[in-house]
Amino acid sequence: MATFTDIGVAAAMNILSALGFLMAFALLRLQPINGRVYFTKWYLNGERSSRTHSGTFIHKFINLNPRSYLRFLEWMPAALKMSELELIEHAGLDSAVFLRIYLIGLKIFIPITILAFFVLVPVNWTNSTLKNLNSIQYSNIDHLSISNVPAGQFIPPKDVCINHFVFWVHLVMAYVFTFWSCYVLLKEYKIVMAMRLQFLASVERRPDQFTVLVRNVPPDPDESVSELVEHFFLDNHPDHYLTHQVVYNANKIAKLVNEREHMENWRDFYQLKYDRNPSKRPTIKVLWQIMTLYFLLNFLFIYVDAIDFYVSKIDKLSKEVTTKQENIKTNPKHIMPAAFVSFRTRWGAAVCAQTQQTRNPTLWLTEWAPEPRDIYWQNLSISFVSITIRKLIVAVAFFFLTFFFMIPITFVQSLANIEGIEKVAPFLKPLIEVPVIKSFIQGFLPGIILKIFLILLPMILMLMSKFEGFVSLSALQRRSASKYYIFLLVNVFLGSIIAGTAFEQLNSFIHQSANEIPKTIGVSIPMKATFFITYIMVDGWAGIAGEILRLKPLIFFYFKNLFLVKTEKDREKAMDPESINFATSEPQIQLYFLLGLVYAAVTPFLLPFILVFFALAYVVFRHQIINVYDQKYETAAAFWPDVHGHIITALVISQLLLLGLLSTQHAAKSTPLLIPLLVLTIWFHRFCKNRYEPAFVKYPLQEATMKDALEREREPNLDLKAYLRDAYAHPAFKKREDDDKVAGDEAELETIWCPPSTSHARGHQSPASSAAHDHRPYLMLSKNNTTLINSISLFFQIQIHDFIINHQFFYQLS
């Protein structure tokens, strides 16, 4: 089991790793060449650009100012300098409220840590229970835990002494910790709710304020879905209905649209190349396959004008997209029984979104439409009926995933126990017993291996959430976060405790009676704090410091910039600003809340490690939100009820575990005193849910009326229908300027044939030909085709070339 020495070695390794990451970041961010990686948000906002001054060439890549290196840590105060109001304006309410989760951690655990170290640690340390239990394996850290308190001393006898009251101290501290946590949560819920309402009242006009998503529209043989929606809302919302957009299954067109964007990017690249050197038209090599007279496959290499080539490709794809769009709009198979319905006022949209539309509660289901940037378009094509089946399938799959993941968790716990490794691999015993290696195994290795096992898990959980059919990215993130939190709770927390206790006390379980096993477990659970301390240091210290370094985005940016970037649009994509990944970040934060609340009254020695995590993470993520992250959507802190619920869950679990732990200490008469605390915590959660959560789910009609009145006063001539017309059109149906081009505008390419000389067979052009026709396409023929070309007529040559240009039946080799 890990000792103070093992924890010290692990702390030194993780502190050095974190400092190394922070120092590397502080130096890399000063280099101008890295600006697009470490100040991505400012580049995207246009508030920062690449240096174009007339200094030396090296100044554009390396910072040669020695004074800036003396201030290399100024990013920390700079990250804290921006006020919360400025942060909301700069990054949005979601980002500002996300940072408050770390602040809550500091507000809760700083007083708890001080109380625990001044009250509980002396009480635990002054007892000597573990020394009298020869059957229990323990380390010197466990003397600071509740395991070192004598059992059966809750009820004070007539001869009062201080040891008789030690468990009462833990009981009182549990009440104090819970009341303080609930107080902080209540204050934060009020603050975040006020911030949300203020944000909604002050935010500029957005399409989602006027729009609801209608699903499960009943079929009608006499009317289309569009006609049904229009007639229904004209009948039931005649004064407020404005327009609607039917939902189409346009996922297949999206591939063509993406291909067209790719071609446009190549066209822009070659256009920029031509603009820099107008004397020479850029060309590309393409491959044409033909059959000879002897039915042997031959290859014809052709150079064509690059700009004209991509223009023709884009025109062809645009025509194909337009044709498929018309087919989808008229084909009932592609028309989904759902629509985005927009209203003249926010009040009308709020009434529709928050009320039942018909007697049948399964028809004409309405909900607030997500922000257009927040929509996950692929899932809009899923029928409402299949969503229930999909959720059942995902629930079963998630259960088995959680269950079978206990196997790697058990493996990790076996590494945390030296005795277990020696039993499995006795030949490693001489190596393991080396003090440095032993400290490394017990203090560092388990945490890093557990971190590796959890790398692929968020991606799997996100795929499950997408399969369930959620129609917004924010809903997908919150659903994945809930799954991840449950997974961490069951596997990482409970699984580590159960498996770790089994490995560490296996010998005790075998040689003691069944009646003593619960006592052994009760004493062993606090001892697992050492494993979680190593995990906190690996994930919460070194991991957070590695987040600010952005090593992977840095490498990928240079790779893309070197091989893939062709235009400024490519460079923007290569910057990869990322955004707050709520699906993984929030559950990981909640795991630290759970560990802190569980071990606050059990093993307070863990609390300082939690504080370091919250403080470091707050500074790091504040810097990232200000300078790097570009949030993809805005939900006005709609995720806060989930955050509050997860912390309450951690409180309840901590109380249940403490109740079970004390029950193993022969304190059956006093343990029930924790039950009122459990009831009060659940009541507090219900109170907050009823009092504050509606503000995050529903939009107050009073606020909607005030916002509408203010907008009518400021913009009396606003054409709202034009503003909302294409707001919720599928990206594949968005109107483009290129789509309006006439087919006759296509550029026609001329054919200039090279004579079958050796130079042209090798791909070289004569100077005269180059001077006269450098801007036109020409052919390059392989050596084995020269005889064939001499026997082909000029007419056949022209027909081949026309067929290539008109049907684009070739392969690009560039």
Image (tube, rainbow, N blue to C red):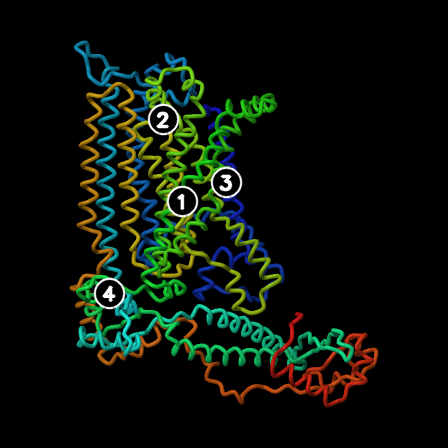
Q: Nearer the viewer, residue 217 or 53?
A: 217
Mark pair 2, 3: CA separation: 30 Å
Q: Say which element carries label 1.
A: helix
Q: Residue 368 at what x, y percent from top left?
A: 27, 63
Cα–Cα gap, marks 4 and 1? 46 Å
SS under mark 2: helix
Separation of disc 1 and disc 2 at Cα?
26 Å
Of tags 4 and 1, which is closer to the observer?
4
Q: Which residue is mark 3?
A: 19
Label 3 sits on what residue type? Leu
Q: Residues within 10 Å of mark 4 (few under 14, many from 20)?
A: some
Sequence order check: which comes first, mark 2 or mark 3?
A: 3
Among the 4 quarters of the image, the one containing residue 311: bottom right
Coordinates of residue 242 in the picture (x, y in percent): 24, 76
Of the image marks 1 and 3, the number of the one nearer the N terminus? 3
Q: Nearer the viewer, residue 235 or 493?
A: 235
- How far across and how far down the image is residue 613, in percent? 40, 40
Q: Which residue is mark 2?
A: 526
In this view, the mark in front (4 or 3)? 4
Nearer-N-terminus badge (4/1)? 4
Residue 812 left/right relative to 536: right
Q: Crowding at label 3, few (<14), some or many (≥20) Cα neighbours within 10 Å? A: some
The local secondary structure at tag 4 comes to: loop
> Could you tell me the amino acid type at mark 1?
Ala
Residue 362, image x and y in percent? 24, 62
Q: Is residue 103 above or below residue 35?
A: above
Mark closest to the chain's N terminus, 1 or 2: 2
What's the distance in space between the residues labelled 4 and 3, CA to CA?
Answer: 58 Å
Amino acid type, mark 2: Pro
